[in-house]
Structures are given as structure tokens and as C-alpha cells.
């Protein structure tokens, strides 16, 4: 593409595209959290959440945000009976602690005549990764401090990242934001507090989560201005770009599919879609199942069950995820896979409302990815990572395929 064409394409994109203007206006909004440069600082997120979920604070929400948080956490923990009991209880006596013994958030419900003391420990991660031994250390502190209490441990991250400790339940921000959004729509709380909470929800969705409206605008812009966008994208610094390319090219797919075939499986793997820091893989063999095509606002193919590799400066993780889509279809897929145990993979305890990491396992550590970013990818490293990913898929996908084929899917209502 010559310079004249590049300039014309860029001009059409930036100056004449109404879709680009709409996307820009949606993203170019005033946000107090970004204005104060705290959007990426986890301690500020914890401070804000601790304030709004504390019923004693003068925000006017009473315990509405407290209930929204507990609904999110206990829903992920698969504790509907406890959730119902707390829903019918007075939460005015809940104790909210911030940075107690370095734990981001800690909620304590006192013992009652019908219920033991309950302690919720929450470790929050926005862009940073988990430190070695951190979660085990926090768990022991909580259990030793309140030995008679019932304990829950939650790892709250933007995309439901997998923690290293099996006692910790992985929770994504998407469901929490949906539940907090309900509080905003009820128009309770003081106006200033409501504006702050609404800004917080929009900021997280804009920066870290998927928005179907913005995704649709982005797809229209790509269709109309492909050359200009490819020109810009090729010049965007992306520390994980080379790694993702190495995992999605034809040679990488050949390695994965050869491993599957050598293991006796008839499954094949293909690339579904690629985003800035992650790639989605699909199993074409599963496309024959109608239930797999009931997705909504996740990838252009509308598949629900996908394999995901998330790569960033904090490391790389392999996920088998149930994305957003028709509730009946998501529940059916979850029901089919709930009995599966994959060696080395962490497994979800329940189905979240929008996005569920059904299984996850680390692919590369933070240190390994940092080394790749600083030194670049040599062929030996590429081959090693491809083989590791291929081996993970080869030993996990047949079990998933068997469970899906064994399950009696009922066609979800349209």
C-alpha cells in the first residue's frame, strides 16, 4: 500500500466515518477515576468498593451494593441457600475491612442464633498478577484468626483469571458490574454517589470488558476501513503480539492438530477470532451442535464454547470458556461439562451470568512472558510453547468431546 493510499484511507477513517465518530464519542467520555489516574491502581478499586459496600458509609445505598457483591460472590461459589438466607437477613451489622493484613477486602458477618460467623476474603486484581504464595498465606491468616467461622475466598479479576490456589473461587468483574448496575438503575443512593458508581461501572466496561454495542461499531469500521486500520494496527506497540501470532499461524495449528490425531482423536482446532491480548480457538467438530451457536456479543461467529489463550505482561493462561449468550444454551453446555475433571486445570464451581472460565491452566509465567517481550521470540521458544499448548489441548479436548457427545442436549428455545 503506497503512502497516498494510506493517507486517503486514514483521512476517510478519521474525518468522514460516522461509525468512527460514534465509537470515539462512546470512548471519549469524562471519567473521574481516569482523571485522577487511578483506573489502573488496584488499591483505589479496593478503596472504592469497600466504601460503597459498607452500609454504614454516607453514600445512601444502604446495603444494596453489599447485596450486589454477595450475590455475585455466592453465585460463583454455588451457594444458593446461603445467598437466599443472607438476602432475607439484615446486613447492617456486616463489618467491611480494607487491607486487613494486606487482604484487599474482607467482609465479616457476626454469628447469629441460626448461622455461624461468616468471613469473605477478596483478593482483587485489575492489571497486576498474583504473587507467589500470596493466596495461601492470606487463607491461613483468615482461618487462624477466625477458626470457628465459615470461610470463603474469592479471586476477583477483570476476566475471571485463574488463581493458583484451589480454595480460592475465581470471579469476574462482568457479573459484579451487572449487579451494581441494577443498583444504579433503581435510582437509590445520593446523586453524587450514584454518579460515581455509574462512572466506575462504565470505566471498567470501557477499559476491560466487552461491550456488544461498541463491538458492533468496531466491526462496521473494520469492514469499511480495513486498510487504514491494518496500517495503524501494524504500528501499535503490543508486547504480546508476537507470542499470539506464534500460537495462531498455520504451523501452530498443524502442530496442535497433529497432536490430537496422534492421540487418536478426530477433533481439529481452528482460530475463531483474535483480539489485542487474547485469541479464541474453536473446535469445528462441535459446530454440528445447535446449542453451540447461541452466543451473543462475544465473537463474530456467535459460538458459546471456545478455547482461549490470554497473553499479557502478567503471563499467559489457557482457558476453556463459556461466553455470553442464550441462558438455556449456556446452562446446557455447563451441565454437559460439569462432571468433567481435567488434570492440572482449575474448574469453575458454578455458571456465572455472562462469562465463565470453565477450566483454566497457566501456559507461561509472568517472568517467561517478560523475557519474551524483552528478548524477542526465537524459534526454539516458539516450538516449545506450541508443543506445550498442543499437549494441553490433546489431553483435555477428548474428555470434553466425550462429555458433550454423551449429553442429551435439548434445543434451546429461540
Image (tube, rainbow, N blue to C red):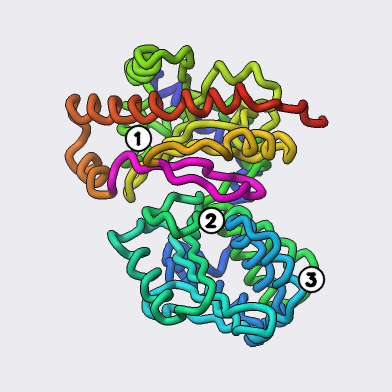
- Asked if residue 237 shows in the view, the reply is no
Displayed quadrant of residue 187 = bottom right
Label 2 CA crowd tier, 10 Å (few <14, some 14–19, many 20+): many
Is 204 one of the magenta-colored residues?
no
Is the N terminus in the top left, top right, bottom left or bottom right quadrant? top left
Chain-order first, disc 2 or disc 3: 2
Tell me, for residue 241, which label it has, or none: 1
Mark sitting on residue 171: 2
Residue labelled with disc 3: 187
Secondary structure found at label 2: strand
Residue 364 among magenta residues: yes
- Give me the residue at 55% from left, 79% from top: 108
Residue 277 versus residue 351: which sits nearer the camera?
351
Q: Which residues are magenta?
A: 345-365
- Do the numbered discs 2 and 3 sit on residues whose CB atoms are within 8 Å? no
- Please state which of residues 202 and 127 is positioned toward the viewer in this rendering: 127
Task: Give me the C-alpha separation between circle 1 and circle 2.
Answer: 27 Å
Circle 3 packing at 10 Å, graded few (<14), some (14-19), many (20+), is few
Alpha-carbon span between mark 1 and mark 3: 43 Å
Disc number for residue 221: none
Q: Is residue 3 visible?
A: yes
Residue 233 in the image: state x and y as whole percent.
42, 33
> Which of labels 1 and 2 is toward the front?
2
Q: Does 108 sit left or right of 22 as displayed? A: left
The answer for how far apart the CA atoms under marks 2 and 3 are is 26 Å
Amino acid at each position: 500500500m503506497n503512502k497516498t493510499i494510506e493517507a486517503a484511507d486514514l483521512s476517510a477513517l478519521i474525518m468522514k466515518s460516522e461509525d468512527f465518530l460514534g465509537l470515539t464519542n462512546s470512548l471519549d467520555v469524562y471519567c473521574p477515576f481516569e482523571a485522577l489516574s487511578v483506573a489502573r491502581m488496584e488499591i483505589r478499586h479496593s478503596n472504592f468498593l469497600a466504601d460503597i459496600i459498607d452500609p454504614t458509609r454516607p453514600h445512601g445505598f444502604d446495603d444494596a451494593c453489599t447485596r450486589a457483591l454477595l450475590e455475585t460472590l455466592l453465585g460463583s461459589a454455588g451457594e444458593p441457600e446461603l445467598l437466599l438466607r443472607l438476602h432475607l437477613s439484615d446486613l447492617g451489622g456486616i463489618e467491611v475491612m480494607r487491607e486487613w493484613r494486606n487482604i484487599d477486602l474482607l467482609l465479616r458477618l457476626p454469628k447469629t442464633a441460626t448461622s455461624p460467623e461468616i468471613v469473605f476474603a477478596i483478593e482483587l486484581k485489575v492489571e497486576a498478577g498474583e504473587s507467589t504464595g500470596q493466596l495461601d498465606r492470606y487463607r491461613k491468616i483468615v482461618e487462624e484468626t477466625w477458626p470457628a467461622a465459615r470461610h470463603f475466598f474469592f479471586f476477583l479479576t477483570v476476566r475471571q483469571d485463574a488463581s493458583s490456589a484451589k480454595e480460592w473461587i475465581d470471579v469476574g468483574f462482568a457479573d459484579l458490574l451487572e449487579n451494581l448496575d441494577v443498583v444504579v438503575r433503581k435510582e437509590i443512593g445520593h446523586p453524587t454517589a450514584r454518579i460515581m458508581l455509574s462512572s466506575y461501572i462504565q470505566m471498567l466496561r470501557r477499559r476491560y470488558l466487552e461491550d456488544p454495542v461498541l463491538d458492533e461499531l468496531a466491526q462496521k469500521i473494520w469492514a469499511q476501513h480495513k486498510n487504514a486500520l491494518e496500517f495503524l494496527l501494524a504500528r501499535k506497540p503490543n508486547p504480546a503480539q508476537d507470542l499470539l501470532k506464534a500460537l495462531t499461524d498455520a504451523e501452530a495449528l498443524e502442530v496442535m492438530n497433529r497432536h490430537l490425531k496422534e492421540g487418536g482423536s478426530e477433533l481439529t482446532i481452528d482460530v475463531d477470532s483474535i483480539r489485542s491480548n487474547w485469541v479464541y480457538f474453536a473446535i469445528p467438530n462441535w459446530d454440528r451442535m445447535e446449542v453451540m451457536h447461541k452466543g451473543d456479543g462475544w465473537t463474530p461467529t456467535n459460538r458459546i464454547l471456545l478455547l482461549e489463550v490470554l497473553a499479557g505482561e502478567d503471563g499467559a493462561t489457557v482457558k476453556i470458556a463459556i461466553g455470553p449468550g442464550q441462558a438455556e444454551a449456556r446452562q446446557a453446555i455447563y451441565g454437559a461439562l460439569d462432571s468433567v475433571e481435567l488434570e492440572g486445570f482449575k474448574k469453575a464451581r458454578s455458571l456465572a451470568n455472562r462469562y465463565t472460565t470453565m477450566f483454566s491452566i497457566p501456559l507461561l509465567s509472568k517472568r517467561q512472558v517478560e523475557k519474551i517481550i524483552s528478548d524477542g521470540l526465537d524459534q526454539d521458544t516458539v516450538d516449545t510453547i506450541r508443543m506445550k499448548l498442543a499437549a494441553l489441548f490433546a489431553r483435555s479436548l477428548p474428555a470434553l468431546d466425550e462429555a458433550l457427545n454423551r449429553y442429551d442436549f435439548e434445543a434451546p428455545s429461540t
